[in-house]
Amino acid sequence: MTPSQRAFPIHPVHRNLLASVPWSLVEPHRTQAMKNHGQSLEQLAERGGLDLRELLAIIEGLTWRQMPRLTTAEALARVRARLIA
C-alpha cells in the first residue's frame, strides 16, 4: 500500500456511515490527536480508529471540550466536506 492509499479507520460505531478516511487527512493533525487522546495516530488506528466527532475535533484543531455538540449527521457532513476540500 502506498502512502497515498493508506487509510485511517473510523470507529465501528460509525463505520456503517464511513469506513475510513485517507491517512493524509489526519497526518497533519498528529499533534492534536496526541493532545486529545494521548496516543499516536498509529495507536488510535490499531485500536479501531476514531468516531466521527473525535475525528472532526482533531482535524479542526479542537480539544474535546472545545468541540461543539454535533449530531452524527452533522459531524459526518463536516468530515465529508473536508474530504472534498
Image: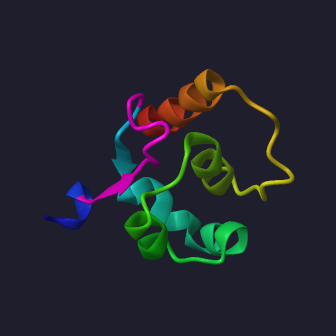
The segment highlighted magenta reads 6-17
The residue sitting at 45% across, 53% down in the picture is: 25
Asked whether 58 or 52 is in front, the reply is: 52
The residue sitting at 63% across, 75% down in the picture is: 34
Asked whether 61 or 75 is in front, the reply is: 75
Asked whether 79 or 13 is in front, the reply is: 13
What is the quadrant of residue 32 in the picture? Answer: bottom right
What is the quadrant of residue 17 in the picture? Answer: top left
The residue sitting at 64% across, 56% down in the picture is: 58
| Residue that protrudes farthest toward the front in the picture | 13
Which quadrant is the N terminus positioned in? bottom left
Find residue 11 and report its horizontal and vertical position in percent: 46, 48
Residue 5 part of the magenta-drawn span: no
Q: How many marks?
A: 0
Predominant secondary structure in magenta? Answer: loop
The residue sitting at 39% across, 34% down in the picture is: 18
